[in-house]
Structure formats: C-alpha cells, structure tokens
Image (cartoon, helix red, strand yellow):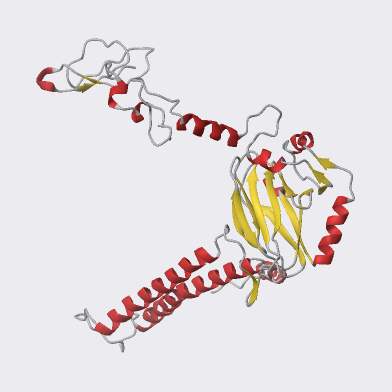
Amino acid sequence: MTKPSSPGRCGRWLAALPLLALLSGCDMVVMHPAGDIAIQQRNLILIATGLMLLVIVPVMVLTVLFAVRYRHTNTDATYSPDWDHSTQLELVIWAIPLFIIVLLGAVTWSSTHLLDPYRPVGRIAPGRAVPSGVEPLEVEVVALDWKWLFIYPKLGIATVNELAAPVDVPIRFRITSTTVMNSFFIPALAGQIYAMPGMETKLHAVVNTPGVYAGQASNYNGAGFSDMRFRFHALPQVGFDRWVASVRAGSIQLDRARFLLLQRPSEKVPVQRYAAVAPGLYPAILNMCVKPGQTCLADMMAADRRADTHGARKGANGNPRAGNGQRKPEGALFRDGNEKGSSPHWSQDREPVPPPGTQTRLPNRNRDFTMLAPGTPNGIHTLTDKG
C-alpha cells in the first residue's frame, strides 16, 4: 500500500515556489554589459559555449536514445555483436570535433589579440570608430586595503570608492597596488585585470550606455575584501563635466601625508573626494617611495644598471661577473668553476661509518640526510641517519 504524500511536504514545496520568482530579478551583468569591450567578451563566451554544445547536446540526446532503444526488454532492436567499423560513423566522430577545435582556436586567437587589455580602443561601438582628436580619459587606479583610489591626472582630482567617466569616450586605466595582489573588475565595462605592488597593469575600455554600475575587487586579499566595492558612473559629457566641477568644489587635497593616512587598512570606507592631487603621487605609489627618505624602485634599478654597465661587479678572480652590461645572478649555482673553490661536501664531523644497512640514532641530534658516507667496503655508500 502506497503511503500518501504528507501535506507538510507539499506545503514546503509550494512555499519554495515564490523563491523561483526572485531569480528573475537577477541581473546577469556579464551577459548584458554596457561597454563595447565587455560586449565582445560576452560574444566570445556565447560562441565558445555554442561550439561546445554542438558536441554536448548530441551526446546527451544519444545517451537517452541508446538507453531506450537498446534496453534489455526491447527485443525488436537490431543485435549485431560482430559489428566493429563504419566509415560514415568514423567520419562524423572525427570531422565534427576537428571542425569545432579549428573554429574555436581561430576565434580565440583573434579575440586574444583584439581584446588585449593593453591594446588601445579602436572603436566606440560596432561601425563607430573613435573620432579623430579624441583623447582617452586617463585614470590611475590604486588598490588599497580595503578601498579603491582613483586619480585623474589630467583633471587634477581624485576619489575613493567612486569612479566616473563620460559615455562613448575611451578610458585608459593604469593600475597598481600598495600591498598585496588584487584584481580590478567592472563587469559591465570589461574583464578583470590584476593590480600588483611595484608593478603597473593597463586596461582600455569604453562605456556606451549611461548608468551606475558595480565595481569590485575580484581577488581575495584579506578581512575587508567583501566590502571593497565601488560605483562606476557612466555619464553624458555634460553630466561628467558637472561631476568634475563638484569634486573640484571641495577643499580637501590629496598630498603625500594624507595618502599615507589613507593607505592604512580600513573597511567599509565611504566615498571621498579630493579637489587636488600632489604632483607625482601616482609614480611615487607605483615606485613604493611615498614616505620621505624612501628610495624609489626606478632609482634602484637605474643604479643597478649603471653599476653593471661600468663593470663594477667582479668575481673572485677579478674578472667581471657577467658580460653585455648585465649582472650575473648571485649564488653558488651561478658561479663559474674558478670561482667556486673546493671544500668537503659535508658540513660537520662524522662518527665512524656504521656497517652497511644499519643506522645510528643518537639523542638530541637533528637528523641529517645530506651526506652519503664514503669509505665503505666494495665502494658501497650508506646513508648516515643521526637523530
């Protein structure tokens, strides 16, 4: 006798149905972007997915078809135990995947170059080239703990956790970090790109649709990661000019001393605006020399190049350590034979070698597996284990 379904169980299923309606409100921003670069990346995802479905869908359909048609109880199905080859089937099995791989490889190769984040934007939208004389909006991005700093070098302003740009104007981002690796990501604008301390990455993009879009850190970097978010305002040119004027109307200036306070770890930082920025602040951040007295990375590398060029670094024999103006790496593995000298290959005195196959374990001694003890009969080397 079948037990009837419990009313409580049915009630729970019915109560869960309204939750499905909430899914309709999800905004798949990656599939509905607002910029031409992000749209091309979306199209690449769709093309790749469609090509893979050419194999996945037939396999799923044929799996069900074979299970039904050749089931044990279907006595009408053809039984061919000696069948082992079909030229037509072999052609289909190999030709279709080969076609997919070639097409997918061609699309991926071309898109990798066309959508290179370091490549300047060549068009505003399909069929719309960048107007002559239009200069990209330059934005210097600094990933802090845990907030984003945006510097507009040509406009002389800066903001924290707020980014704005005019519609249909190319944007050139220069991106770095102060402490740990991070990732700058505005899904509606373009794909993510990493930010690393002492290094600079670049991103070129354009936004075509006015609106307010979410930006975030997409690489986990500590306790405040989940709140390291900002808003990207895509504005008409008139609205962007008003936004710049409102930032300039403030009285706070971002000098080096204020930046050193800003870069201290903090969470859930509200929007901050700076009406002026100290000259050379971003290069100092990039070269990790904002604090007074710090030597910039660029200066250290330039000094190393000058020392190598003039042959200041020499080996033990008095000869230059490397040619062509380049410094030879340090360490014994990189030394020339005449620079290494000679010494025993063990680092401490050894007790008499035990007979082959035995181990000596002494108390209060660290184990040493680095020596093959020489001198055993018949040339046999035994491993001395001290512990």
Taking the image as drawn, is residue 370 in sight? no
Q: Position of residue 151 (x, y in %)?
A: 74, 49
Q: Residue furthest left?
A: 378
Q: Tally the marks.
A: 0
Left or right: residue 381 compared with residue 275: left
Q: Position of residue 67 (x, y in %)?
A: 38, 78
Q: Position of residue 273 (x, y in %)?
A: 83, 48
Q: Residue furthest bottom?
A: 76
Left or right: residue 345 compared with residue 165: left
Left or right: residue 334 compared with residue 344: right
In terms of image quadrants, where is residue 120?
bottom right
71, above or below 174, in the image: below
Q: Is residue 349 or residue 111 the one in the foreground?
A: 111
At a point 54% along the width and 70% down the height, the residue shown is 44
At a point 20% along the width and 22% down the height, the residue shown is 382
At a point 12% along the width and 22% down the height, the residue shown is 379
Q: Is residue 31 or residue 103 the one in the foreground?
A: 103
106, above or below 78, in the image: above
In terms of image quadrants, where is residue 171?
bottom right
